[in-house]
Image: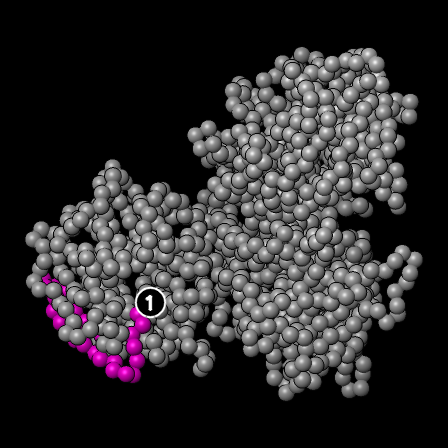
Amino acid sequence: MAYIAPIHRPNSIRHALRASLFPDEEDCLVVAKANRLEFWKFDGDTQLLKLADTKVINGTISMMQKMRPRESETDLLFVGTERFQYFSLLWNPEEEVLETTTSFFDVNVKYMRDSQSQDKCLADPTGRFMVVLLWEGVLNVLRMKVHKAKRKEIDWMDQIRIRELFIKSATFLHAETGHPKLAILYQTRTDIPDSHLVTYRLFTDDNNTEISRFEAKDQIDIMEIHDPSASMLIPVGKGEEEQKRYIVRNAAQARAQLGGLIVVSEMRLLYYDDAAKKRVETPLREASIFVAWAEYDVSHYFIGDDYGTMWLLTILLEGAVVTGMHMKKIGSTSRANSLVYIGNNLLFVGSHYGDSQVWRVDINNGQMELVPELPMPNISPVLDFNIMDMGNREGDEQTTNEYSSGQAKIVTGSGVFKDGSLRTVRSGVGLDYIGMLTEMKGIRALFPIRSRGNSKYDTLIVSLLTETRVFLFDPTGEIEEVESFKDMNLKDQTLLAQNLPNGMLLQVTPHAVHLLSNESGPVGFPWTPADGFITNASANDTYILLSIDGKSLVSLAIEDHLIFQGQKDLGDQDQVACIHTPPQYPKIGVVGFWKSGSISIVNMMNLEPLHGELLRRRDDNTSVPRDIVLAQILPPETSGPTLFVSMDDGFVITFNVSKTDFELSGRKSVVLGTRHARLQLQPRPNAPELFNVFSTSEHPSLIYGADGRIVYSAVTAEDATCVCTFDTEAFPGSIVVATDEDLKVAVIDNERRTHVQPLEMGQTVRRLAYSKAERVFGLGCVKRQVVNNEEIITSVFKLVDEVKFDQVGQDFPLDGSTGIEMIEAVIRVELPDSYGNRVERFIVGTSCINDIQPGVSAARDEYQGRILVLGVDSERNPYLVGERGLKGACRGLATIGDYIVAALVKTVVVYQYNETSTTSCSLERLASYRPSTYPTDVAVEGNTIAVADLMKSMTLVQFTPPAEGQCAKLTDVGRHHQAAWATSVCHVEGSSWLETDANGNLMVLRRNEAGVTEEDKKRMEITSELNLGEMVNRARKVTVDATPNAVVVPRAFLGTVEGGVYLFGTIAPQHQDLLIRFQSKLANMIESTGLLKFDNYRSFRNEEREAEMPFRFVDGELIERFLDQDERMQEEMVEGLGPDVESMRNLVEELKRLH
């Protein structure tokens, strides 16, 4: 039985609008993200938008519109879903909530054909009538009910057949008569593009009750638009009082006035006044493809094009007379799917292809400025992704760390064309900044200090390169910087400052070690090195460990004064790189060495080594330890202390340390950056015997123990250079964070969340593959440029660093001499070279779009695709090893041992790889298999190949290698006989496979191995199915070492078109019945916005079959909503299940910890 839970919820925005939903407040912004509605309100204090509420819908939102009931102070929000279910929300002043006033569904969906353009929902300017366009040649008319008792409800009046089948755009016109008029821009032919405009009166009677039949005799105006690329209609209002229309009785002298509409084409603008029957045309200086618009006022409109350019359209007026139009570029944004002018000079850009944005606009100067305080990141569409395990760097382990451990990072290829980017999705915790202390550069270290008798910190020591600064905090939060503090040396850099148990204060500078009393100043004489400077210092309550010029170690004992314990000179043998004295084990110290790249645990009494470990992974690796901490991370009853060593190349190596003899074991490695991470111990709140470790690097992390394992949680502190604990009276549980520019106070939010980091690429990252050996990602990219008004598409393969994503080496461009060659698939493999050694190669599959004139067939020897084998040279440049031309596109690649599996246009082929030199190889065709229609994806487990078919679900094919004179062959061993438009496939476990399709369905299929006949055994049966509501682009298998009593075992990650990333797993048999019954109770008891049923939302649905509910599939998003309920509701939900409330709460929290 299967389980699905969101790691990163979809954040693509296709629909947004401005509406007055809350009384006595400004209009709010409503955005739809897959199955969620978000309400953003304008904050007058900050002059920004603020998220006010989020509502989860049991359905994927496909349309939104606002209406205004008669005598209502607020708007009514109309929402439609992809399953043709509709509801409306209206403010209830008595309960002060948005309540569902109407909920209904379209019953006439079985025999109609979907519209060829996007579903549209239009409201007339009065907000009382609405038209919904869902089906080809069908128009749905709705209105607000007029009966006083039912004015909050929507009346579905009728469905009308219309002559216009392919509707490009439609809008209501601003009519002065009160009778709604509808304008439709449509195309008459499918083979040749053209554009026509027609207007109708929506009703035939004066009471607006008899719907027009939309026949030829009902047409008011009909005309051909000379530019066939016309795609957008913009209704123009009547304007202010001084711009009102004046009537001209002589039609020949009439002129176009406000109140008409604008037809937007690629090369011209047409203004049409339907009352005066006059047209005003304006050619565009620069052609473009326009996709979205928003009204600023009756004469100014924002228009976004397909290339992310924002235009300002201005209607040129003489009073109310339209004399022309003008278009001006005012900025570059994400490619807009929805534009909304919010008011207060704020423009919202909702995007499916890139980040959604809020811009501050100035139409007088034709300028716009991004509002950085309102980031709305978006990773849709997820075209491909890969799983980078930041751990498991000490060998070739096949298992992956759990996502929730923070060591598994998902790297996605997101966005389209100029909005294309790489995104990293990682589990982590939040860092909430309380405030900024001061702007300060060059901070080297931070040290918290307690005054005598205080239980909390009240002093912050800030060490800079040439001085030390001191800040005092009082209980009310007031901060004061002082010029002197307890006779500390503030004219030098402070290497170490800390409180001691006897009430004294320790300060170490490059020149001396000072022991200070809180009352009488210095205690005894400071210790100074006889020769050289102190370069590093560490101390616990008993000993001080010093490094002198990196050439010698010194140990000092702390009593009433400083006592010299011993010194060890290294001479020319090595140099000290870093030192550490564990707070819980005062008699030992840890030392890292430059030259040997090793660490030693030493006795603080005599500095003699107790244990040592060489850290370099390869002989030619020059990586050295740069920082060390040793502390108790996991509870002492279950584990000993852990040693963390930060290496110069960005790796953090960990060891288990014996409590008795401090022997090192269990070496593991995690990569946290390209440079060394700075490790800083943080005492864990409410657990004085345990510590956390804060790591600052390119991937800042909070390292802590949870559920018997060490977790590396990402932290939103990308610019942090050093941190320290600072639990004060005014800021309890806080930390201080230093960056290159300033000093801030923050609080760590322990609620686990998803962290997304972007790297803008400016081109579509269509495919990606990860190489752990080379520490790079191989990217197949597609770039679009407009040069001299001509669109040029190019495709390249490139390598980027695994941490910073900076490009390494040069691009490898694809051949574009005869057309466009596109990258379709990229994998990383290890294959034998000409000497039999294993070498790493990238295999790239391509397709060719040739510039062939209609009616002319391609030459027989002209390739339609290629398989490229690429190597990486010593300078990390990709180079061509060999290629094979294909008669069709290569859509997917995989490997079985040293054999290459390729999914071509109509066949699946297995090739044998033979490399003759470093720059030449051959691919020999061994066996082929012809699927039902067209393979879209392939996955391999052992010798079995799963083939996802474009229309006929999936098949299993077994590969038999050549042996003893027998040819290799591919044998059909399994087939799913139902129709499904498959998009991806991956192995789950045993004989089970996961398939996803274009309708958003997830199916777990298993061979019927217990069948009687061979045909029965080949038949694949569905063991679990659910509709995700989003189309999955890619499914990647993951193998995790789960605990024996795990409720759910992770099996795969899924990336969707809407930007969602999901965890797919299988449920342990002993928990299956409980979770299914629990899900059923939650579905019936949790009230959904819009009164939509969970079972209907998650049930399987495609063109041939529709189920009533999900089958043996548990939705983690619904299960986790149990934690949001109050105690009384939770008791009702678990009644009759068996376990009590506390047990079910623990179970759900365990499931939530998976992601």
Picture layout, residue 731 above or below residue 500: above
**Is 531 part of what is drawn in magenta?**
no
Residue 1084 appears anywhere in the view: no
Identify the residue at image location x=48%, y=41%: 373
Label 1 SS: strand
**Side of 430 relative to 90 (left or right):** left
Residue at x 41%, y 60% (from the top left corner)? 697
344 relative to 627, above or below: above
x, y (%) of residue 587? 22, 69
Q: Which quadrant: the N terminus?
A: bottom right
**Apparent side of residue 632 relative to residue 1089 in the rendered image (left or right):** left
Q: What type is the residue that disc 1 sits on?
A: Ile
Instruction: Judge left or right: residue 352 versus residue 232.
Output: left
Horizontal and vertical percent position of residue 490: 19, 55
Display colour scheme: one colour
According to the image, label 1 marks what residue? 628
Eyeballing the image, is 1032 above or below 147? below
Q: Position of residue 1118 (x, y in %)?
A: 58, 42
Magenta-highlighted residues? 553-578
